[in-house]
């Protein structure tokens, strides 16, 4: 369902995606890969988690570029 929501400055279109539709949500696949990578790791603090998430997201980008 697409809803046209007029604001003062722009036309904004809201697209409601049904629950549990990972193929329609482009963030699902990268997040699943990142979670799979991070789950067995023990990270002491939020900074270490942030570093690993960035590291893994960069690796995911490289993998996706190789597929293209």
Image: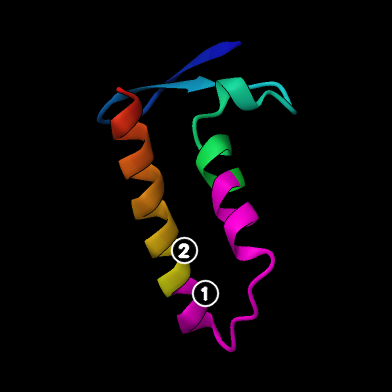
Instruction: Give the residue number, with chain letter if any, for mark 2.
Output: 53
Of residues 13 and 9, which is closer to you in this image?
13
Dot 1 lies on which element? helix
Q: How many marks?
A: 2
Of all residues shown, which one is farthest toward the front? Answer: 66
Q: Is residue 11 above or below residue 9?
A: above
**With respect to residue 49, does 36 lie above or below?**
above
- Determine the residue located farthest toward the right in the rendered image: 20
Range of the magenta residues?
33-50
Q: Position of residue 22 (x, y in %)?
A: 64, 27
Q: Is residue 16 visible?
A: no
The answer to whether residue 36 is seen in the rendering is: yes
Vertical side of 44 occupied by 61: above or below: above
Q: Is residue 48 magenta?
A: yes
Residue 3 in the image: x percent, y percent?
53, 15
Q: Residue at horizontal 56%, vertical 87%?
A: 45
Residue at 30% from the left image edge and 32% from the top image edge: 66
Residue drawn at point x = 29 percent, y = 33 percent: 65
From the image, tell me which residue sits under label 1: 49
- Residue 9 or residue 53, whichever sits in front: 53
Disc 1 to disc 2, how far (Cα)?
Answer: 6 Å
| Crowd around label 1: few <14 · some 14–19 · many ≥20 (10 Å) | some
Q: Looking at the rendering, in which quadrant would you find the C terminus?
A: top left
Could you tell me if the residues under marks 1 and 2 are in contact, i.e. CB atoms within 8 Å? yes
Q: How is the image coloured?
A: rainbow
Q: Is residue 29 magenta?
A: no
């Amino acid at each position: 369902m697409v809803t046209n929501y007029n604001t003062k400055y722009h036309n904004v279109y809201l697209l409601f995606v049904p629950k549990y539709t990972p193929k329609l949500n482009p963030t699902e696949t990268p997040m699943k890969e990142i979670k799979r990578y991070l789950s067995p790791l023990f990270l002491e603090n939020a900074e270490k988690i942030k570093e690993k998430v960035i590291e893994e997201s960069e690796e995911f980008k490289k993998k996706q570029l190789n597929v293209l």
